[in-house]
Amino acid sequence: MRLTFAFVLSCLAFPSAMAETEFLTIASTTSTDHSGLYDHLLPIYEKKAGVSFRVVAVGTGQAIRNAMRGDADLLIVHHRESEERFVDEGYGLRRNDLMYNEFVLIGPREDPAKVAKADSIEEALRRISLSGFTFISRGDDSGTHKRELELWERAGVQVRPASGDWYWEAGAGMGPTLNTAAARNAYVLSDGATWAAFGNRQDLVALYRGGSLLHNQYGIIVVDPDRHPHVKSELAQAFSEWLLSEDGQQAIANFEINGKQVFFPNAQLR
């Protein structure tokens, strides 16, 4: 169960209300929240362990910065390099693979850049840049934004000089970025879960998907109490272990959007 504004007010008025139920703060990427995954998972664990949750869902880069400040007990994001740096610099106890899905290249149904005919994601992006048709980037240092920039680099396309021309940066989360792409009938890279849950598609369709470069791995990290003694590391570790267990992994697999599984558990315990 999420902490609502009314609940927080009641706790200010009656401090004992907060003491009765311990809660964990998760610094999270937006896709796990906006897809509805937490609405599915967290009540299961709350019933099992009597723990409530506060989810702060932002882009991966901001989620990691929040956890670095000690503003979270647990981190669930999707950019392995940044996650491993977080642990190496002493902010997290260890990183474990949790689950994966995929990134999807979305665009207008008529596909003016013909990206659906591309042999690779790199070629698909080159086709967009050469065509001059609009591409909307999240531009927010999220895991999706980081992957998008990596893909442009692999494609040999410099997007910075094109900023404000055919390349537009929304500076927003995945949902608002998809709304912008729908309004402009533009191309956009999305995580598969947010796309599956997105209702305002208008004339947008999934045009290119599949392949190792569009693999979208999520990691889970307990914030290190040696760095931030106030964090609830024992509660966070218990929740992490449940998510990585057979029961937690099955709960992830059971989550569906419109009858389709959108996250695929692949816990690797270390």
Image (cartoon, helix red, strand yellow):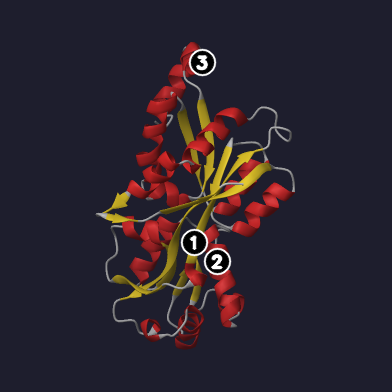
Query: Which residue is identified by label 1?
Result: 216
Foreground residue among 31 and 214? 214
* Residue 259 in picture, x, y percent from top left: 25, 54
Tell me, yes or no, if residue 78 can be seen here: yes
Tell me, yes or no, if residue 159 can be seen here: no
Foreground residue among 267 and 181? 267
Give the CA distance from mark 1 to mark 3: 38 Å
Q: Is residue 76 left or right of residue 260?
A: right
Give the CA distance from mark 1 to mark 2: 9 Å
* Residue 260 in picture, x, y percent from top left: 28, 56
Is disc 2 surrounded by few (<14), some (14 to 19) or many (20+) residues within 10 Å? Answer: many
Q: Is residue 61 left or right of residue 15?
A: right
Question: Under tag 3, what secondary structure?
Answer: helix
Is disc 3 surrounded by few (<14), some (14 to 19) or many (20+) residues within 10 Å? Answer: few
CB-based contact (under 8 Å), mark 1 and mark 2: yes
Which circle marks residue 19 in the picture?
A: 3
Extreme residue in the left direction: 259
Query: Which residue is identified by label 2?
Result: 147
